[in-house]
């Protein structure tokens, strides 16, 4: 599975604006941080114009989950750059994304909730296609043999992308 997220870009641009004194970060009593309203447009515009960072994950095949009636299914990724990702980084992402200065921003956290998950999906008996397999619904971390694993809760995507289908889908979850 592949997870596309603009979170590393958002974090990088937010930090740049904070260092330049053009933005502020506010902590709420609920444990969340908020970027000042004045900087939100600048950060979001810059980050959304950039190529998303691609995370690789392992998980239940979404079609298998669907045949078992699962609206929500598990997946896993790493909270670090694995040697496999590092070796092919420049083949799939722009070069700046593969430099150590950028990799400080790739840690998975709550900012990645809602990120799309893509996978190879069968489209019949003799073909497959790369398509939307779900959306990140929840994130938790665990450590196994000193390797940080991220447990992902993935929600099946809406059956179609009409407004009514998305509202119906959101009500079920």
Image (cartoon, helix red, strand yellow):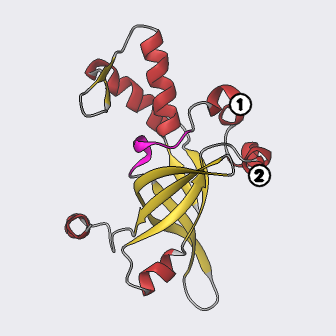
**In what element is the residue under mark 1?**
loop
Q: Is residue 28 or residue 145 the one in the foreground?
A: 145
- Report which quarter residue 153 is drawn in: bottom left
Stretch in magenta:
107-113
Task: Find disc 1 in the rendering and name its residue.
Answer: 99
Which residue is pictured at 54% across the width and 51% down the height? 142
Please identify the residue farthest to the bottom as the structure is shown: 125
Which residue is pictured at 44% across the width and 46% down the height? 112
Q: In this image, 119 relative to 95: left or right?
A: left
**In what element is the residue under mark 2?**
helix
Which residue is pictured at 61% across the width and 79% down the height? 128
Vertical arrangement, residue 52 with respect to residue 9, above or below: below
Task: Find disc 2 in the rendering and name its residue.
Answer: 84
Q: In this image, 159 relative to 16: left or right?
A: left
Q: In this image, 100 relative to 158: left or right?
A: right
Q: Position of residue 33 (x, y in %)?
A: 33, 28
């Amino acid at each position: 599975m592949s997870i596309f997220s603009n979170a590393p870009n958002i974090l990088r641009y937010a930090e740049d604006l904070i260092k330049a004194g053009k933005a502020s970060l506010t902590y709420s009593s609920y444990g969340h941080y908020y970027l000042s309203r004045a900087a939100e447009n600048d950060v979001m515009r810059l980050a959304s114009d950039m190529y998303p960072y691609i995370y690789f994950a392992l998980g239940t095949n979404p079609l298998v989950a669907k045949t078992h009636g699962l609206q929500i299914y598990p997946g896993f990724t790493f909270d670090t750059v694995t040697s496999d990702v590092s070796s092919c980084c420049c083949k799939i992402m722009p070069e700046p994304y593969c430099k150590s200065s950028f990799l400080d921003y790739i840690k998975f956290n709550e900012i990645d909730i809602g990120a799309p998950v893509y996978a190879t999906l069968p489209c019949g008996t003799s073909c497959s296609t790369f398509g939307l397999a779900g959306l990140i619904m929840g994130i938790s971390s665990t450590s196994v043999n000193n390797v940080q694993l991220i447990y992902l809760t993935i929600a099946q995507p809406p059956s179609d992308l009409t407004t009514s289908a998305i509202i119906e889908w959101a009500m079920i979850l």
